Image: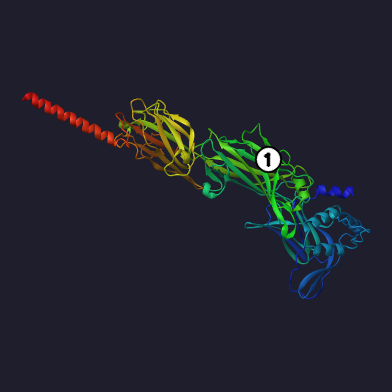
C-alpha cells in the first residue's frame, strides 16, 4: 500500500483528461484486423513547443471493423506477465475488495468501467495512472511537428488498444504557464486528441478609483480603462487581481504565490483581502445558496514585503490545498485579491506611468516540490499630471519664458515681474459646476509662490479644479473669483494625450483689475524655439496675473459708488457757486 501511494509523488500532471475517443469511421471491409497489426496512430494538438509526450500501451485489444467503424474487443493487459499484479494494484487504488464484492476481475471490466464514466472521470484517471505507473512497458515517443503556428505531437504504426499518454519533460518548457499533462486514449485506428488545459492558473489585474466613501470602482467609466487610470498625489489607488482556482487532483503540496511590484511612486497600504467567489454553498437543490468564501489573513494567506526589493510584496495562499481537499467544486472558481497603494510624492508625472506589475508562481509538476510555472506579467499604469502656477504682474504677461541659456533647465516660467508670497488654496470639484465647500474637496492646505512667482502643485488626476487666491503680493489686488481649470488626459497604446481647458475667472472678479488666467501645455514652442528646454515634457502651466491699484467689490457696492459720485458733483457745484459769488 505504501509503495503504491509513493507513486503519486512521481505522477506527471496537473491537468488530467480521461478521453476515450469515439471510434473513427473508415472505408474498410467488415471483419477482424487483429491486435498486433500496426495500423493505428495518435496525434495530439493544441500544444506548445518543447514537450515530450510518450504513449504507453496498457491494454491490448482486437481491432474490428463493423459497418465501416473501427472498434475494440477482447480487451486484455498488454503485458501478460504483469497482468495479475496490475489488476491487484488497480483494485487497491479503487478500494475494491472481496468483502464489498466489487473486485475488477479482468482488464475488460476495468476498461468498461472507465469508458462508462460520466462523472468523476478525472479522479478515476488519477487512480488508474497511480495504479499502473510502475507496470507500464511498451512505449512510443510522439514526434513534435510544426506547421505554421500549429504544433502537434504524433506517432504512427502502433497497435490498437488503450494508451496512457504522459508528458515526461522534466523541466519547465514554457516558463510562463508551463504545465504537465497525461490522459488515456482508446486507440482504434487514427486518433486525434487535444491535451486539455483544465485548471491551469491564469491571472488578471485591473486598477480602479475610490469614491467619496472609499469604495473601489473598477468600471471603465471611473478610469481611462481597466488597466490605466489617473490619480492625485495622496490618493489611495485600488487594485484587484482575479485568478481561477487550479485543479489540484494529484498534488500533496502546492505553491500559490502572487508577486506584486509597485513602482517608487506607489506606497503599499498594507490592506490585502482575499476571497473565493461563490466558494460556500449551503442548502441543497432549489434551496442551495452560494456565498463568497472570505479568507483570513495570516491563517489562509500571508503577505510579505521584501526588504531587498522595495515595492515588492508577496501574497501566498497557504491553505489552498486544504480548501481543495475539503471541496473539489472550488476548481475554476475565481480567487479575488484586493489591496490599495497611495500615490506618493515620488510619483512620475505627465506621460510617465506609475506602474504596478503582478504575476503568479504555481506548482506545475506533482513529481517534485520545486518545479513551477508562472503566469505572464500583468501591469497597470497610473498617471498624474504636474501643474505649475506662474504669478506675474499684468504688465509682464507677454514676457519671454525662461530657457536653458539664461536659467537652469526646467525654468519654464516667466520671471519678469514675478510676484512672490501669493497664497492659494486648491480644490477638486466633486459634484457641481460652480463648486462650493460642500461640493468640492480641498487638496493640501495652502500653496505660496516663491521668489520666481512659482508654485509646483502636486500631481493631479483628470478632473475639474479651482484655485482661490487668499493672499496677494503686497500692493497688488487679490483675485476675487475662483480660477477654474480642467485636466483631461487620454490613453492609447502609442502615446498619452493631455488636454486642458482654458482657465476662467468667474464674473465676481472686477473687470478692470487686470487679473487674468490662462492655461496651456509646456513646451508649446519646441518647433519654433529649440533653445527652450523644459524639465517635464507636456507639463501644464497656469499663468495668473495681478495688477496694482484700488479694488472695488463687483457686487453689492453699486449704490455706494453712485452716492459717492453724486456727493462729489454736489461739492463741485457748491465750489463753482462760491467762486462766482466772490467775483460779483
Residue 106 lies, with reference to residue 217, above or below; the image says below
In the image, farthest residue toward the top? 582
Q: Is residue 413 visible?
A: no
Residue 24 lies, with reference to residue 501, above or below; the image says below
Residue 427 % position (x, y): 46, 37
Residue 234 % position (x, y): 53, 35
**Based on the displayed image, in which of its 4 quarters is residue 32 positioned?**
bottom right
Tally of numbered discs: 1
* Secondary structure type for disc 1: strand
Q: How is the image coloured?
A: rainbow
Residue 537 lies, with reference to residue 576, above or below; the image says below
Front residue of 300/194: it is 300
Q: Residue at x 38, y 35 (%)?
A: 543
Residue 517 % position (x, y): 36, 37
The residue beneath circle 1 is 315
Q: Residues within 10 Å of mark 1 (few under 14, many from 20)?
A: many
Residue 334 % position (x, y): 67, 50
In the image, farthest residue toward the left? 584
Q: Is residue 447 visible?
A: yes
**Based on the displayed image, in which of its 4 quarters is residue 516 positioned?**
top left
Q: Quadrant of the C terminus?
A: top left
Front residue of 534/500: it is 500
Residue 106 lies, with reference to residue 258, above or below; the image says below
Amino acid at each position: 500500500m505504501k509503495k503504491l501511494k509513493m507513486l503519486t509523488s512521481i505522477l506527471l500532471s496537473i491537468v488530467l483528461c480521461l478521453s476515450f475517443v469515439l471510434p473513427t469511421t473508415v472505408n474498410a471491409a467488415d471483419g477482424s484486423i487483429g491486435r498486433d497489426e500496426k495500423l493505428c496512430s495518435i496525434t495530439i494538438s493544441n500544444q506548445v513547443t518543447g514537450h515530450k509526450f510518450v504513449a504507453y500501451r496498457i491494454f491490448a485489444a482486437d481491432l474490428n471493423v463493423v459497418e465501416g467503424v473501427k472498434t475494440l474487443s477482447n480487451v486484455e493487459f498488454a503485458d501478460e506477465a504483469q497482468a495479475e499484479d496490475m489488476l491487484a494494484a488497480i483494485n487497491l487504488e479503487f478500494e475494491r475488495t472481496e468483502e464489498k464484492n466489487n473486485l475488477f476481475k479482468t482488464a475488460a471490466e476495468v476498461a468498461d468501467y472507465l469508458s462508462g464514466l460520466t462523472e468523476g472521470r478525472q479522479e478515476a484517471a488519477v487512480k488508474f495512472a497511480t495504479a499502473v505507473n510502475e507496470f507500464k512497458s511498451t512505449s512510443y515517443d510522439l514526434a513534435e511537428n510544426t506547421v505554421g503556428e500549429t504544433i502537434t505531437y504524433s506517432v504512427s504504426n502502433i497497435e490498437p488498444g488503450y494508451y496512457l499518454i504522459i508528458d515526461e519533460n522534466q523541466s519547465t518548457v514554457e516558463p510562463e504557464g508551463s504545465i504537465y499533462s497525461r490522459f488515456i486514449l482508446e486507440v482504434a485506428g487514427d486518433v486525434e486528441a487535444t491535451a486539455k488545459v483544465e485548471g491551469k492558473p491564469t491571472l488578471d489585474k485591473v486598477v480602479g478609483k475610490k469614491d467619496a466613501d472609499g469604495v473601489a470602482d473598477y468600471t471603465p467609466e471611473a478610469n481611462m480603462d481597466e488597466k490605466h487610470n489617473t490619480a492625485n498625489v495622496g490618493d489611495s489607488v485600488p487594485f484587484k487581481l482575479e485568478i481561477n482556482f487550479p485543479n489540484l487532483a494529484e498534488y500533496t503540496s502546492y505553491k500559490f504565490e502572487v508577486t506584486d511590484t509597485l513602482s517608487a511612486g506607489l506606497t503599499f497600504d498594507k490592506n490585502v483581502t482575499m476571497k473565493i467567489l461563490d466558494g460556500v454553498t449551503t442548502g441543497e437543490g432549489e434551496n442551495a445558496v452560494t456565498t463568497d468564501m472570505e479568507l483570513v489573513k495570516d491563517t489562509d494567506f500571508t503577505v510579505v514585503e521584501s526588504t531587498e526589493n522595495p515595492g515588492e510584496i508577496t501574497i501566498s495562499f497557504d491553505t489552498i490545498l486544504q480548501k481543495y481537499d475539503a471541496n473539489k467544486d472550488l476548481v475554476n472558481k475565481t480567487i479575488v485579491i484586493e489591496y490599495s497603494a497611495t500615490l506618493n510624492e515620488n510619483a512620475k508625472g505627465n506621460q510617465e506611468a506609475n506602474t504596478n506589475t503582478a504575476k503568479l508562481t504555481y506548482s506545475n509538476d506533482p513529481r517534485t516540490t520545486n518545479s513551477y510555472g508562472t503566469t505572464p506579467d500583468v501591469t497597470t499604469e497610473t498617471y498624474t499630471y504636474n501643474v505649475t502656477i506662474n504669478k506675474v504682474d499684468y504688465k509682464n504677461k507677454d514676457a519671454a519664458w525662461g530657457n536653458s541659456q539664461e536659467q537652469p533647465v526646467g525654468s519654464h516660467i516667466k520671471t519678469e515681474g514675478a510676484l512672490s508670497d501669493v497664497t492659494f488654496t486648491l480644490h477638486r470639484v466633486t459634484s457641481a459646476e460652480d463648486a462650493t465647500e460642500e461640493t468640492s474637496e480641498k487638496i493640501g492646505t495652502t500653496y505660496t509662490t516663491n521668489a520666481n512667482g512659482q508654485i509646483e502643485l502636486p500631481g493631479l488626476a483628470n478632473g475639474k479644479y479651482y484655485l482661490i487666491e487668499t493672499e496677494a503680493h503686497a500692493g497688488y489686488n487679490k483675485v476675487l473669483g475662483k480660477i477654474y481649470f480642467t485636466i483631461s488626459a487620454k490613453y492609447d497604446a502609442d502615446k498619452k494625450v493631455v488636454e486642458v481647458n482654458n482657465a476662467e475667472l468667474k464674473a465676481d472678479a472686477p473687470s478692470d483689475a487686470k487679473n487674468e488666467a490662462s492655461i496651456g501645455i509646456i513646451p508649446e514652442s519646441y518647433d519654433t524655439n529649440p533653445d527652450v528646454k523644459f524639465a517635464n515634457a507636456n507639463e501644464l502651466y497656469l499663468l495668473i496675473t495681478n495688477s496694482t491699484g484700488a479694488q472695488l467689490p463687483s457686487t453689492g457696492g453699486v449704490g455706494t459708488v453712485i452716492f459717492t459720485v453724486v456727493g462729489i458733483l454736489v461739492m463741485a457745484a457748491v465750489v463753482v457757486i462760491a467762486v462766482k459769488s466772490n467775483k460779483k
